[in-house]
Amino acid sequence: MLSGFFYLNFLPSFVCAQFKFEFKNDVPVTLNGINSSAAFSGGLNNPQFSTIDFDFDGDEDLFIFDRSSNHILLYENVEENNQRFYRYVYNARRFFPEELNYRVALVDYDGDGQKDIFAAAVSGTKVYKNTGNATDGLSWKLVSPLLYSTYIHDASNLYISQTDIPAYTDVDNDGDLDILTFHLSGQRLEYHQNQSQELYGHSDSLIFELKNECWGKFMEDINGFEVVLSPDVSPCNDDTGVINPKSDPERHSGSTVLALDYNNNGVKDLILGDVSYRYLNLLINSGTTVNANSAMINQDIHFPANSKRTEVVSFPASFYEDVDFDGVKDLLVAPNAKNSSVNKNSVWLYKNTNTDSQPVFEFQTKSFLQGNAIDVGTGSVPVFTDINYDGLPDLVIANYFEVDEDSSRKSTIHIFENQGTPGQPHFVLTDTNFLDVSSLGIGYRVIPAFGDLNSDGYTDIVLGNDNGKLFLLQAGSANTFNTLVALQNSEGVQIQCNGGASPQLVDLNGDGLPDLMIGTKNGTIHYYQNIGTQNTYIFKQISTQLGNVNVSENHIGYAVPHFFKENNEWHLLCGSYSGKLYFYRDIFQNGEVSANFELISSDFLGINTNGYSAPFIIDIDNDDRLNLFLGMELGGLWHFEHDPNSTINTYQPEKTENKVTVYPNPNQGAFFLSGDILLDKENILITDISGRTIPFQLTNNFIQLNNCVSGTYIMTVLKNDKIQKKSLLIHIY
């Protein structure tokens, strides 16, 4: 029976000694004529920037939360040879709490010199206090699962839309942290004053009161980008600025707020971004003292007017941090709209050439960090083939899509030619739109597989798309192709799966003919055996769930299979929608392709891209050490190499019958538990994030929570003497 609280450390299931992969960022890559120092840093889509001294060495490192996959990135502030630069830190999520979603800012709210976490909660914000130290490293304590504020007389959750980015700032310069956020209507800015100094004379409390419901006396136009200054409507024309917080039915959802004293007059000015536009708007405050209900008197929709106007597609968010190591804060601007923003060359950097209290911003680049890393948009899938027939494996990277400046999407394939040697590869970006696949009219997420299907010495290309259809570009000569045709099976019908087709051509059964494996949206692998001849392919469907593989979670899988041979034994490493890697062996039994591959790990080496992992394994430098290249939702790559000196060396086959999954998740307080046996109620504990036990009903593995509200819950399950924890996201409509 489960009771009380659990503090568990789960070790990932590792595999045998030849697969001790360690992260390496040292393979030479040239991007746009410049040699990259951090090519395999993973990419950026919708980054949010903060700084933190994560290693307690006295300098501020760069923290990035990317809302497109809730991914955390860290760049260490390093000095070598009298030069400062950022060094990418792999697997940064291990330093921070789980369940960080949508929005994260690091701010020191209690004045102890350590940055704390302000993160999105359901309709508001939760706060983690930084309790780390130089000896033990970073650690966190949840001090507020949901911030509250007093509205007139009643306390309620301090509302912040999940799409918005508010300003956590000391508005009244009294030493504690206040919050500026848009009202539920999305038109006017609320000022929630922290009462810590007023009540206790210090800054370590989080007690808020609505001080002004139209701070700055402006309103956003529900139909446009400009704001209305000093509108003659309540509460913006009221002396106190505080009225009924339930008013204003019109909505203008989607704003970002940066508060700073732009003109050094002692009060905060604003830089606003809007969900519908690509520009920033600078609002200048007329006041000279705090808490005077002063109005914004000027706006600059061409900000920064002295330099290159910001034009970020779309929903620009601005951040104020020193990123060039000169001790003065700079301006970073990045898109904040998931799946509809420009997703490469999209992080704008403006250097502050003056002071923090009176900044002057000069445009530097619109590819901050991105220009030094492989980044192909959203959803990278790496494949190696000798694209130019020079005997060296080249790097081909497909994407799910990239977003152009006109907000249109297209699927593209990037080519990085290997211009090195067999022992020293060097990849050079030579083509960002190979085959111009968007012009082929086959949709998004166009994934290639390469192989010679007719033994003519030229590489043919099989293409899978997001609709699950397979197509063929047959080579007429080196890199010239015949007209695109539907790839047909042995019955003359176009090969198709249920969506998310990720093909691989590989001679799995050893008959000298390339067979076709297809990863699918539902997490399984389709197997088509080539029963043709050396000169003519014929693909016959053998299985729609090869090896009983299933990498889905909550019925979504997006399997990206990579079969590879090592020590004369076949293995399968499979990417997934969750971002985890699934590792299988025993592909053959008694000389035949097995009906059930052995699952070694569903969390291979703890590697997790947080979305759409896509692996490819190759010995890229012929040193008898395998290399793993891994694509991800963020559009970049990670690179790993087998390290025989690694301590990763545990072989532990995973028993899938012990796994418990939850579906649907998110849900409205009712969900199923999947598994091979019925669970007993006394072996299940459900708590909220503060540890309070939540009552529930259990019938045939169907759970109904009693009297729950929207929020995050933790379910702990005891099954076959093993404890599993699952996060539940409840939305009550």
Image (spheres, rainbow, N blue to C red):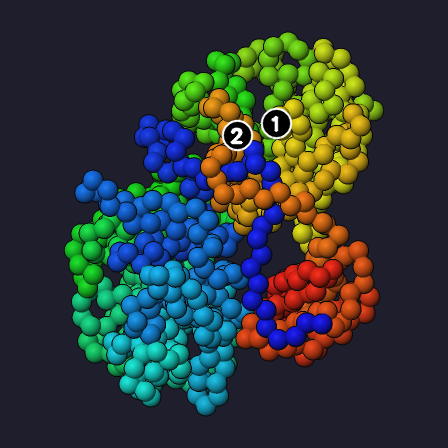
Q: Residue 18: in sight, yes or no?
A: yes
Residue 226 place in picture, x, y as percent: 36, 62
Q: Amino acid at mark 2?
A: Leu
Q: Residue 387: in sight, yes or no?
A: no
Q: Which residue has dot 1 on it?
A: 566
Q: Residue at x 37, y 80 (%)?
A: 205
- Work out whether mark 2 precedes mark 1 in sequence or the reverse, and give the earlier one: 1
Residue 633 lies, with reference to residue 722, above or below; the image says above
Residue 473 place in picture, x, y as percent: 63, 21
Camera-nearest residue between 246 and 490: 490
The local secondary structure at tag 1 comes to strand
Residue 124 place in picture, x, y as percent: 49, 71
Q: Which residue has dot 2 on it?
A: 626
Residues under labels 2 and 1: Cα distance?
Answer: 9 Å
Q: Find out whether the residues at labels 2 and 1 contact each other: C-beta distance under 8 Å.
A: yes
Q: Residue at x 70, y 65 (%)?
A: 718
- Indicate the quadrant containing the N terminus: top left, top right, bottom left or bottom right: bottom right
Q: Amino acid at mark 1?
A: Glu
- Indicate the quadrant containing the C terminus: top left, top right, bottom left or bottom right: bottom right
